Image (cartoon, grey):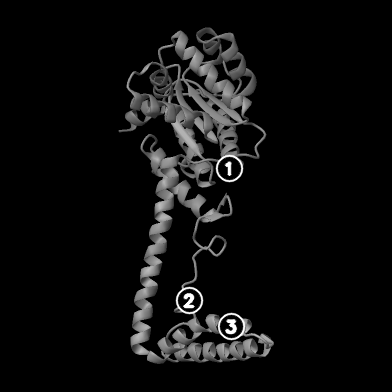
Amino acid sequence: MGFEASVLRRATKRLEDRRKERAAALARREAEIYAQLPRVAEIDKQLKGTVYQIIAASLREGRDPGPSIQVIKDRNLSLQAERTRLLLEHGWGADALDGQPVCPRCNDTGWIGAQMCTCLRQLCAQEQIKELSKLLDLGEQSFDTFSMDYYSAAPWPGKDCSPQENMELVFDMCSNYARKFGRFKIRNLFLSGPPGLGKTFLSACIARTVSERGFSVVYDTAVNVFARFEEQKFARDRQDVEEARDETKRYLGCDLLILDDLGSELTTPFVQSALYTLVNARLMAGQHTVISSNLSMEQVRQRYTPQISSRLEGEYRVLPFFGEDIRLQRKKDL
């Protein structure tokens, strides 16, 4: 899984800032203890010289270094015991001067070999949620706050179940998709239905949950996505082209892409080509995508090429939304 460079950069800086803060706190604590207990300062100085004594003992010619090394080790243990006793007697913890890392797995570096450590991944997830919050209202949008109150339990014309019954199924699918991301048998979702029925809300819930689990998530509207593809191809300014290229790489390379409001864009031949590239490339790479749209699957077939509609119908689980517009219901309640 790969986080955006800006997200990784900010998370790494936070990790480095934490290391600096802990180092500064340790230095202040050390200065305070040494001022209060000069003997501890003297012991630490002797302990630091122990390594050099061991090396010197092992290099002495014509003598077995073993006995000398053992004497030094014994003295070292005695000094450590005295140091611990002094610290405890004066109200300090035995490890007050040890400077233990918060994450012993990676020693606060963020990496275990070439693998990102859990501690850095958590920071990346937090930074990613901040990034997503610029586009999505992630303040209170979570599966735990989702309400069925706006979905009627009465039969709905032309449907074999009520809006509430349908939304319970949709909610369960979206929740399982997000919470079991990477292990769930369904890779792609197509949220279909009129505006004001909770498609963006559930998209935000999915984005938050998948981000919190440490996966890279990119959310954007169809209009913005295809504008970036156009800039990459047609822009004359080199910087604009490079920025657009970076954006399209995000869309193609993230663990989860949430493409919002498909169908709101002007469907030109170029947009058709870009959409096919986006959908097909992510399918071929085995990546996950959630698309929301006001279009029904029948309207998708009418609007886009057979190659696109075939992939959306065949490779995406279509989740229909129907019922009364939630925004209008809230307006009536005011």
Q: Are marks 3 and 1 in contact (CB under 8 Å)?
A: no
Q: x and y percent of residue 145 in the render?
A: 46, 43
Label 2 SS = loop
The correct choice, above or below, for 299 with respect to 143 in the image is above
Which mark identifies residue 226?
Answer: none
Q: From the image, which quarter does the C terminus lie in?
A: top left
Using the numbered discs, state the Cα–Cα distance from disc 3 to disc 1 in whole angstroms.
54 Å
Label 1 SS = helix
Q: x and y percent of residue 233 in the render?
A: 42, 17
The correct choice, above or below, for 189 with respect to 178 in the image is above
Label 3 SS = helix
Residue kind at label 2, given as amino acid type: Asp
Residue tagged 1? 179
Query: Of tags 3 and 2, which is closer to the observer?
Result: 3
Using the numbered discs, state the Cα–Cα distance from disc 2 to disc 1 in whole angstroms.
39 Å
Residue tagged 3? 54
Kindly tell me whether residue 153 is visible in this rendering.
Answer: no
